Amino acid sequence: MPDAELAWRRWVVRWALVSLALIVLACVVSGGFLHPDEYFQTIEFAALKLGRTDPSALPWEYAARIRPWLQPALYVALAKGAMAAGIVNPFHQVLLFRLFGGLCLWLAILALMRSAKPLEASVRRWMVASLACLWYLPYLAARTSSETLSASFLALGLCCLLPTTGKVDGGAPELPPARFLLAGALLGVSFSFRYQAAFAALGVGLWVLFTARATPLTALARATLLVAGFAGPLALSLPIDHWGYGSWSFPPWNYFYENIVAHRAAAFGTKPFWYYFILLNRSAAAPLTVLLTAAFAIFAVRFPRHPFTWASVALFLCHSAVGHKELRFLFPLMLPAAFFIPMAFGQPGPRGAAVFAKIWAQRGRWPGRILVAVNGAALLALLLTAPVRQLTAQRYLRHDLPGGGVVHCSADPFLFGPLRMGFHRHPDDQVRVVDGPGLAATVAASRAPVYYLHDGLTLPEGVGGKATRLHGSAPAWISRFNFGGWVDRLRLVTAWRIEPPSGAREK
């Protein structure tokens, strides 16, 4: 094996292992959810089939039958398998859900790393490192969101259409027919997790039809194979949705009708066509996101015949045309985005290669080093993101407080806005919500220790008795530095054991 080939393989293996380690770490330490749908449209749907929640407790999407059941069905299978193996703790079961999603994304990352081989040497090396360490990838890999699983299979489908040798922007390459069939099937799975993936699949279909260096009949045959592959997972999802909802329905149409025709999505707010440029670039990682946004545009102009261009532009434009906008709707592009910066600035080719090569040369100098430092800081910040208060309280309730007894709380730990959380709740949990005076009265009247979950680091004043801090989502000493009330605004929960006054115990 040539030395260059051996060095390339070692480079891929090294960064693939780094990627795997970061994803597993994110799955372990990154609790909670980025958006409520990540929990209530997937885990709570699974909770229904596991007998842990009631249909009336689910969000409106369940009654409207607009969500796919493929992901909840996989979670039900994982949970039942875990319980058969003796893993009954729901927090450990959710960790398995995260690891499953993280593994899917890692396999997509591995496929993309291998597909980078035809690129210029420095470009492919940076691309592989970016796929391992781009600041948002480990965190999003650990999410139980439909967007993450959809992104994984979208990337796998696109990889089937990338050439392994030769030009990187030559239109639809000469590939075996089975590759187009497999690509369609993977795009169908992506759609079955998240229906908006249809926008990217549409772009891929147009790419096959209009960029092929072949006869129109050959291009049509390839597109037909793509559609046939896409139809397979769609057909298989129908009985799964029947199992989930209890009767036959077609959730993709229901989703379109409710959100677009009936304007349910618009009820959550609308923004102008160009607003994604604001959403993408208003975070603390703006130095990276601005560069990534510019690279997206440059990539599309320099490589107009690349499948990533057609899939990404189609998804971006279609979502921009829809009034309701959320950043998570663009998450299916999280993996192709790793290609944008190296290829836009570093890959030799037409349309301004000499100009962009000067920018690419800065990657090893201070501008590049600053961006690498910002990326590392953003990655660490996401990994340390605190989970939602309710899940922290539920964890303490299960791990740190006695089972079967009454636990008093400053707020219901199983209530998130109007929605009830049932997956982690134990049948023996007895929760009573009390305020400060109510807790003081409970402690004074009790003969046994009182267990209390509190939103904050310190107990309300005047509680009485002897309080012992059992656990907390932050050390108590940070309250000394509560300048401007910043600690009060954190999602902190503490668990307490309060011994009643001696006089109360003697009654």
Image (cartoon, rainbow, N blue to C red):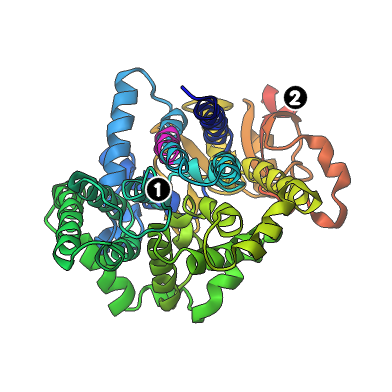
Looking at the image, is 400 positioned above or below residue 491?
above
Looking at the image, is 257 positioned above or below residue 215?
below
Give x and y (percent) for residue 200: 35, 62
Which disc number belongs to residue 148?
A: none
Marks 2/1 in contact by CB < 8 Å: the verdict is: no
Disc 2 residue type?
A: Ser
Is residue 101 magenta-colored?
Answer: yes
Q: Which residues are magenta?
A: 98-108
Q: On the picture, is 83 further left or further right than 444?
A: left
Which quadrant of the figure contains the C terminus? top right
What residue would you read off at disc 2?
Answer: 502
What residue would you read off at disc 1?
Answer: 166
Is residue 6 magenta-colored?
Answer: no
Which quadrant of the view contains residue 97? top left
Residue 397 seen: no
* Most distant residue in the front direction: 2
Give x and y (percent) for residue 78: 32, 31
